[in-house]
Image: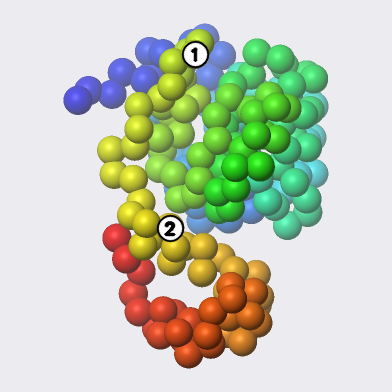
Amino acid sequence: MPDDSMTDIGPDKSLLLLDDDEPFLRRLAKAMEKRGFDVEMAGSVAAGSAIATARPPAYAVVDLRLEDGNGLDVVEILREKRPDARVVVLTGYGAIATAVAAVKIGATDYLSKPADAADITNALLATGDDLPPPPENPMSADRVRWEHIQRVYELCERNVSETARRLNMHRRTLQRILAKRSPR
C-alpha cells in the first residue's frame, strides 16, 4: 500500500515531538521527517511549553508522563496558542480516565506506547470524525501485560520485592516473568 501521507499533511508541516525517552524520540523524529513533517523535539515539559508558546506547531505528539511533569500541560498551551493544532497523546499507561482527560483538553487522539510512526501519522492526519484505521499489528495481551510489568519495575527502581507488592503478585512469579524474553 503506497504511503501518500505526505500529500495529506498540508502547507504547515510543523510537528512537535515531546518525550523524555531520548532513543524513542530520535527514532520517531527520523521516521516523521521521512513522512514530510518539519520536526522539533523536546525532552521535557519546560522545553515543550517553550516551543508551544514561541512557535506553536500544526501537529504535536506529546508523551503523558515526563520527568518534570505532565504532558497535558503542553497540550493546554497548544490549545490556547493554536486551537487548530492536531495533538496525539502517547503514554505507557493505558488508563481510560487519562484518555478522557487528554481528549477533554483538546487532544485529537490517544495512543498507548509503544506506537509506531505509521499509527501516529494515521492519528495525526485523521480528519473530522474519521477514526484512524486500527493498527496493522496490535500488541498481544501478553505483550501489553509484559510492558506494564516492565514499566512498574522501572518506576520501582528495579526493586523486585517492591514491584511485586505494587502489582499484587508473588515475588517469585515476578522474577520468572522478568527472566523471560518479551512476548511478541
Looking at the image, residue 6 lies above or below residue 112 = above
Q: Residue 161's quadrant in the figure?
A: bottom right
Residue drawn at the location 58% of the way across and 80% of the way down: 164
| Dot label at residue 107 | none
Given residues 122 and 50, the one toward you in this image is: 122
Q: Residue furthest bottom?
A: 172
Taking the image as drawn, is residue 52 in sight? no
Please, what is the three-letter code of the amino acid marked with disc 1?
A: Asp
Given residues 72 and 21, the one toward you in this image is: 72
Color encoding of the figure: rainbow
Taking the image as drawn, is residue 44 in sight? yes
Q: Residue 52's quadrant in the figure?
A: top right
Image spot of residue 38 (x, y percent)? 53, 26
Image spot of residue 113 (x, y percent)? 49, 49
Q: CA distance from mark 2 to mark 1?
A: 27 Å
Q: Which residue is mark 1?
A: 129
Horizontally, is 122 left or right of 104 in the view? left
Residue drawn at the location 44% of the way across and 80% of the way down: 178
Q: Residue furthest left?
A: 1
Q: Residues within 10 Å of mark 1 (few under 14, many from 20)?
A: few
For mark 2, give the secondary structure. helix
Image spot of residue 115 (x, y percent)? 44, 44
Looking at the image, residue 13 lies above or below residue 31 = above
Please, what is the three-letter code of the amino acid marked with disc 2?
A: Val
Image spot of residue 34 (x, y percent)? 39, 32
Of callouts 2 and 1, the N-terminal one = 1
Given residues 150 and 1, the one toward you in this image is: 150
Residue drawn at the location 34% of the way across and 37% of the way down: 135
| Dot label at residue 144 | 2
